[in-house]
Amino acid sequence: MSIELFDPVGEVEVVQRQAVRALQSLKGKRVGCIFNQHVSALAFWKALESEIEKTLQPASVFRIYKANTWAPAPRAEANRLLEATDYALVGVGA
């Protein structure tokens, strides 16, 4: 029998990131919604979207309602959402 030892010391990868763009307000902005449609959150999510539309009056709403609760949102759709919105709400497990 042999035992393999691994050195726990590693190099930290420095990730280059763009500066975060802070919004002064969410009112009138373009909003994106990604929701996994889990049965336990349907009523909550519907009420949340309704309240956002009433209170924040978004310029537009881009929705991704996933067909599969467990799979990630399709990359192409997520990329379109990123381009078409100012901010996004992501539902549980979306």
Image (tube, rainbow, N blue to C red):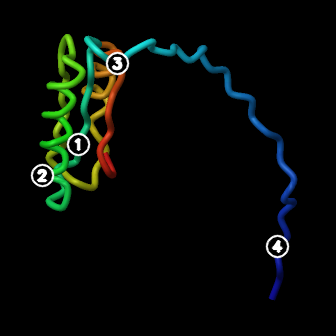
Q: Residue at x 34, y 18 (%)?
A: 26
Choose mark 2 or mark 1, whichever is in front. 2
Of the pair 41 and 6, the residue shown nearer to us: 41
N-term-proximal mark, 4 vs 3: 4
Choose mark 3 or mark 1, whichever is in front. 3
Please say if 12 is above or below 56: below
N-term-proximal mark, 3 vs 1: 3
Which quadrant holds the N terminus? bottom right
N-term-proximal mark, 4 vs 2: 4
Spatial CA distance of label 3 from label 1 is 19 Å
Q: Amino acid at mark 3?
A: Leu
Identify the residue under disc 2. 43
Asked whether disc 2 touches disc 1, contact meaning CB atoms under 8 Å apart, the reply is no
Of the pair 39 and 50, the residue shown nearer to us: 50
Spatial CA distance of label 4 from label 2 is 52 Å
Choose mark 4 or mark 3, whichever is in front. 3
N-term-proximal mark, 2 vs 3: 3
Please say if 42 is above or below 61: below
